[in-house]
Image (cartoon, grey):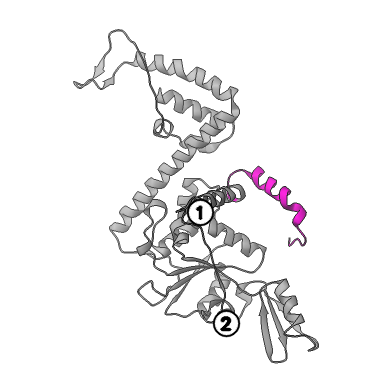
Amino acid sequence: MRNALTRSLRAYGEMIGNRKAATITQEDVSGSACILLSLFVRDPQFQGQTKERLAMTEATRLVETAIKDPFDHWLSADADAAKTLLDFVIDRAEERQRRKQAKETARKTATKRLRLPGKLTDCTRQTAAGTEIFLVEGDSAGGSAKQGRDRETQAVLPLKGKILNVASASADKLAANQELKDLVEALGCGIRDRYEDDKLRYDKVIIMTDADVDGAHIASLLMTFFFREMPRLITGGHLYLALPPLYRLTHGAKSVYAHDDAHKEKLLRTTFSGKGKVDISRFKGLGEMPPSALRETTMDPAKRTLLRVTVPHGRTQEEHEEVAETTRLVERLMGRKPELRFQFIQERAQFVRDLDV
């Protein structure tokens, strides 16, 4: 019976072009199901003295034939229900693969010393209290951040380009992604149900990306990763967004930084009002900023501005509803169904004023 259900779902997945269906096992299909199978056979033959299992190929063929064909017809006749069932089973398969990967990682780390990613520039303080790790995009920004940091308390981990979107990626892609592996190893606290807050190696995890559309996209991907894989890191108050400047306004010996266009216009009306020509330079990325300027504007705890990323704990009914709404929004914007994103854009297109493309 389990074989018939599994084969049918795999075949249906192949028919509709869902390659992930090939990873389905019998346990994924029937592990959470409640099934009653009534079978009458003449001269039953059992396996072993305990007689817990039938050992008859005739019974196997009988059940498989009786179940597979009707189940195939049902899948083909009700596409919506079939897709919902297939997605549910695939989610179970990916969760099984994630648990297997987590066990293997735990087994490996138990027999060897903690390995940190080679591109991580760590801080010198041994305890987590008061330490920070900056997640930056690319080696260029990483170079400026390494030179502008406080070596005792600030670590820097450069990430190559846009990381994997974990909301739409399969478990095997997640396990094979080197950038995310490096990030998990650098933090040292584990993921999902194996997350341990006391093993987090840094007090603050700061996403520091360019002040443009690509930077916002990378920050969104990283927040999605933490929301899906390390939600307790967010509820524990450890995740932050840096606010690097987009413009530098200079008049004579005085230089002031602006975070966005609105801030720039405000400074021109106030700080530089009536002072003649003001030299305005736009930073293309963090890598173009001098290390001293990056430290002064974005990394120095005494002068910078950080945004804390928050998610309610879900202790009250109102917080529980807010968590559920956040989960639905993340799935809508970052999940596997592009039609939901398209619908979101259509609903809000009327509010767009300036398009940065």
Q: CA distance from mark 2 to mark 1?
A: 37 Å
Counting residues from the start of the chain, the first of labels 2 and 1 encountered is 2
Please provide percent x and percent y for residue 100. Answer: 37, 46
Q: Which residue is mark 1?
A: 319
> Which stretch did the figure color magenta?
334-357
Q: Is residue 184 left or right of residue 280?
A: left
Determine the residue positioned at 72% across, 48% down: 347
Q: Nearer the viewer, residue 335 or 53?
A: 335
Residue 355 shown in magenta: yes
Q: What amino acid type should be assigned to the residue bearing mark 1?
A: Glu
Image quadrant in which the C terminus is located: bottom right
Q: Is residue 306 left or right of residue 314?
A: right
Q: Which residue is mark 2?
A: 296
Task: Residue lying at the far left in this picture: please name it.
Answer: 49
**SS assignment for the magenta stretch, majority:** helix
Q: Say if residue 15 shows up in the picture.
A: no
Q: Is residue 302 left or right of residue 255?
A: left
> Of the numbered discs in the image, which one, if any, rests on residue 160?
none
Determine the residue positioned at 45% across, 15% down: 66
Image quadrant in which the N terminus is located: top left
Q: Residue 201: name its quadrant.
A: bottom left
